[in-house]
Image (spheres, rainbow, N blue to C red):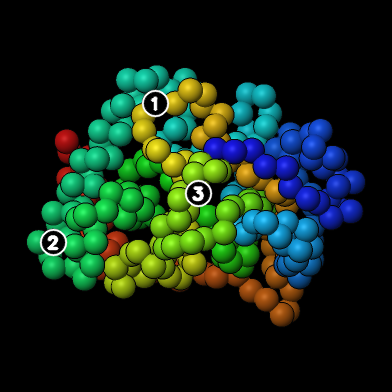
Amino acid sequence: MRHITPELTASLFDHFGNPRQERIGDKPAYRIETFRELVEHVAGLSFKNKDHLLYYRGQNDDYRNKANVSTFYPSIYRGDRLSPKELTERFKKLKEAGRILSDLSEKQKIEGHREIKKRRNVQWSILQHYEVCATPFLDITHSLRVACSFAILNNPAEKAYVFVFAMPYLTNRISINSEHDIINIRLLSICPPTAFRPYFQEAYLVGTDGISDKYETKGELDFNNRLVAKFEIPNDESFWGKDFHGIPYDLLYPENDPILDLCREVKILADGL
């Protein structure tokens, strides 16, 4: 995918340096103390980066590669010593899981099963979001509150991380931008209406266009190419303050979700192959 050079506010420029000379992923995260403060920083970034839509990802940690740079690979490409054989096997499993999902959704008469059957990206999106197997997509959200909730969720550390990414504007529910080599999928528009998880998470998926098990350089698949800023937040209630609150686990991962039950069945069958 194409690397972008973000525009930073004055305070973030002082912290991260000139993004035309240095990469955001090389630097430590910018520390903030409250959700309101985070919203204010993101508002400034949104204004500065008018040519892009900003999306967010919350994580328990700032995962870095051997060069100590923040890295954001889709799950199917993760691993420092990922061999071509292993990558091919991962794609084989993904395609088989997609077939199983398609067959079961049709058999169980899931609303939207025809869409699942004819669109590979819909199959892979559901498999990714319900954590059935590794896929070429990365989970992001358009909700800063959702991202912060994920950053803190099941996190035993005293701090958490929120990352800001710049993506091309959407043109369709599955938007493919050939200039930036990015595919952006709005899960709320393509998932069956009984897939409650993506609706509560305001979920999107991003990947590279022309997805395959072959690439020239692995770095072109890393979404640190689209990183605008990264923030460190405190992992305690003081972050939210009296006016805001995080989204609890049982809303981010609702159990009463028919597609979750379907995907559990898919995972059992796919893992048995």
Q: Secondary structure at mark 3?
A: strand
**How far apart, in angstroms, are the residues tagged by discs 3 and 2?**
31 Å
Indicate which disc residue 59 carries.
none
Furthest-left residue in this view? 107
The residue lying at 13 percent from left, 61 percent from top is 106
Furthest-front residue in this view? 179
Going by the numbered disc 3, the residue's amino acid type is Asn
Q: Would you say the residues marked 1 and 3 are in contact, meaning their CB atoms lie under 8 Å apart?
A: no
Q: Quadrant of residue 107?
A: bottom left
In the image, 23 versus 89, the foreground residue is: 23
Going by the numbered disc 2, the residue's amino acid type is Glu
Give the mark nearer the N terminus: 1 vs 3: 3
Res 181 visible: yes
Q: Would you say the residues marked 3 and 2 are in contact, meaning their CB atoms lie under 8 Å apart?
A: no
Above/below status of 242 relative to 80: below
**How far apart, in angstroms, are the residues tagged by discs 1 and 3?**
20 Å
Query: Pointer 2: residues within 10 angstroms few (<14), some, or many (20+)?
Result: some
Quadrant holding the C terminus:
top left
Query: How many numbered discs sit on the rendered protein?
Result: 3
Residue located beneath label 3 in the image = 177
The residue lying at 73 percent from left, 56 percent from top is 49
**Nearer mark to the viewer, of 2 and 1:** 1
In the image, 231 versus 120, the foreground residue is: 120
Residue located beneath label 2 in the image = 106
In the rendered view, does 231 fall on the left or right side of 271? right
In percent of width and height, residue 56 lies at 60, 56
Query: Pointer 3: residues within 10 angstroms few (<14), some, or many (20+)?
Result: some
Residue located beneath label 1 in the image = 214
